[in-house]
Image: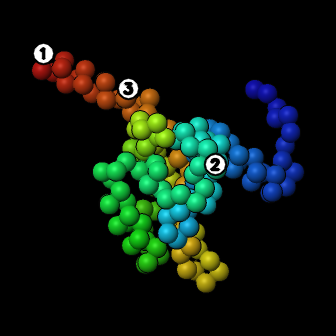
Amino acid sequence: MHAPTSVPTNMTELAEAVLSTASDAIIATDRDGMITFWNPGATRIFGFTRNEAMGQSLDIIIPENLRARHWDGYHRTMATGESRYGEADLLAVPGLRKDGRRVSVEFTIVMLKDAQGNMTGTAAILRDVTKQFEELRKLRRQLAEAKAG
């Protein structure tokens, strides 16, 4: 194991290192679901550059058939300050890439609130699990065929 070449000396450096990662997507939105933060990991997973994504609706990464359900939950959460999902819940959903291909993502989400406790948006950390999802689906199909055969 290699020692880190540079160790963050303060929280600002640590935050910058985490937020600029290219491995996981980190996406923040405002109260209306418009993208307010988009890191290099989001570009890698979804294909949109930061400039293309900033200020856009989350619709750019939500498959069309899932948008109505997503927005019902999102608007209810913004209105009530309560989500069906806890901050520790790991969620799995299909996402949409710029080129139109679907990806499977797992993510955690946190609600963003102002000093008075009012909802101001969300922040999510997303990981592309497409390869694992496809491998699991293949294994399930093989198991079903073995049981039927």
User: Looking at the image, which residue sits at the far bottom?
Assistant: 116
Q: Earlier in the sequence, mark 2 or mark 1?
A: 2
Q: Quadrant of the N terminus?
A: top right
Q: Amino acid at mark 2?
A: Arg
Determine which residue is flagged by label 1. 149
Q: How far, Cα to Cα, is label 2 from label 1?
A: 50 Å
Residue drawn at point x = 53 percent, y = 57 percent: 56
Instruction: Classify mark 3: residues with Cα within 10 Å, few (<14), some (14-19) or many (20+).
Output: few
Determine which residue is flagged by label 3. 135
44 or 86: which is nearer to us?
Answer: 44
Q: Secondary structure at mark 2?
A: helix
Q: Position of residue 132 (x, y in %)?
A: 43, 30
Q: Earlier in the sequence, mark 1 or mark 3?
A: 3
**For this view, does 36 lie left or right of residue 17?**
left
Instruction: Classify mark 2: residues with Cα within 10 Å, few (<14), some (14-19) or many (20+).
Output: some
**89 lies above or below 71:** above
Residue drawn at point x = 31 percent, y = 29 percent: 137
Q: Secondary structure at mark 1?
A: loop
- Judge depth for marks 2 and 1 and give the one in front: 2
**15 lies above or below 132:** below
Determine which residue is flagged by label 2. 50
Asked whether residue 28 is in view, the answer is no
- Judge depth for marks 3 and 2 and give the one in front: 2
Q: Are marks 2 and 1 in contact (CB under 8 Å)?
A: no
Q: Position of residue 34 (x, y in %)?
A: 53, 62
Q: Amino acid at mark 1?
A: Gly
